[in-house]
């Protein structure tokens, strides 16, 4: 069989199997646990289904509140990334990261020195702050994954490669959409 990876933005709410069957007007099968935790899922085409909690939470991440992101690199419990807030974008352009020495004695080790990333920023008054484009950073990561996978192949590297390629494809689509709508480079939706 071939392997597939998919992406789509869905809506979901916690709902156990018994509640879902009641919602659908179905009888609960005798061999099923009505208390099994899960989610009612609504897909972009309005298709509705139910997913067991463990499967759903492995596949989907909540994006309703982007400010809820934790800036911790697994398995560390330290926050090693900071975002500099600004009035217009609330911190989408300048990041600082503590440098890492990799893993030692089974845990990530960080030092006090930092690196910064400035993304290109167009201010409300039209002035520009030069910086990286998101795609540039993604291409760097894509190149790194390719090269590391050549030396240390793994299924996880293939997932990372696929995810980065999907990100770049979405960036290309977004830019083309903005060009087609003649808003590219403007502070318009």
Image: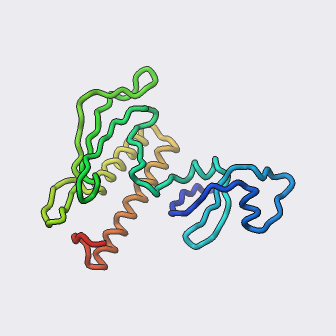
Q: From this view, report whether residue 13 is shown above or below residue 94.
A: below
Q: Which residue reaches farthest right? A: 30
Q: Nearer the viewer, residue 189 or 163?
A: 189
Say which quarter of the image contains residue 65: bottom left
x%, y% of residue 42?
Answer: 60, 66
Q: Is residue 102 left or right of residue 184?
A: right
Q: Which residue reaches farthest front? A: 87
Which residue is rendered at x = 43% and y = 32% of the image? 77
Q: Nearer the viewer, residue 94 or 173?
A: 94
Which residue is rendered at x = 64% and y = 60% of the image? 40
Number of marks: 0
x%, y% of residue 162?
Answer: 46, 54
Q: Nearer the viewer, residue 58 or 66?
A: 66
The image quadrant where one finds the N terminus is: bottom right
Q: Which residue reaches farthest top? A: 105
Q: Is residue 100 left or right of residue 70?
A: left
Which residue is rendered at x = 64% and y = 56% of the image? 39
x%, y% of residue 109?
Answer: 36, 26
The image quadrant where one finds the C terminus is: bottom left
Q: How is the image coloured?
A: rainbow
x%, y% of residue 44?
Answer: 55, 70
Q: From this view, report whether residue 3 is shown above or below residue 76.
A: below
Q: Nearer the viewer, residue 123 or 157?
A: 123
Say which quarter of the image contains residue 123: bottom left
């Amino acid at each position: 069989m071939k392997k597939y990876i998919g992406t789509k933005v869905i809506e979901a709410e916690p709902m156990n199997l018994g509640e879902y069957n009641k919602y659908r007007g179905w009888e609960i099968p005798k061999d099923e646990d009505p208390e099994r935790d899960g989610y009612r899922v609504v897909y972009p085409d309005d298709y509705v289904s139910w997913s067991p909690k463990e499967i759903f939470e492995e596949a989907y991440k909540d994006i309703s509140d982007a400010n809820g992101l934790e800036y911790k690199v697994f398995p560390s419990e330290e926050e090693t990334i900071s975002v500099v807030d600004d009035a217009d974008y609330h911190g989408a352009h300048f990041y600082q990261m503590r440098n890492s020495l990799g893993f030692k004695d089974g845990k990530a080790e960080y030092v006090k020195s930092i690196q910064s990333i400035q993304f290109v920023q167009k201010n409300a008054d039209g002035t520009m702050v030069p910086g990286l484009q998101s795609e540039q950073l993604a291409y760097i990561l894509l190149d790194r994954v390719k090269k590391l996978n050549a030396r240390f192949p793994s299924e996880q590297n293939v997932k990372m490669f696929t995810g980065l390629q999907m990100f770049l494809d979405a960036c290309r689509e977004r830019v083309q959409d903005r060009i087609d709508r003649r808003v590219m480079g403007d502070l318009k939706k």
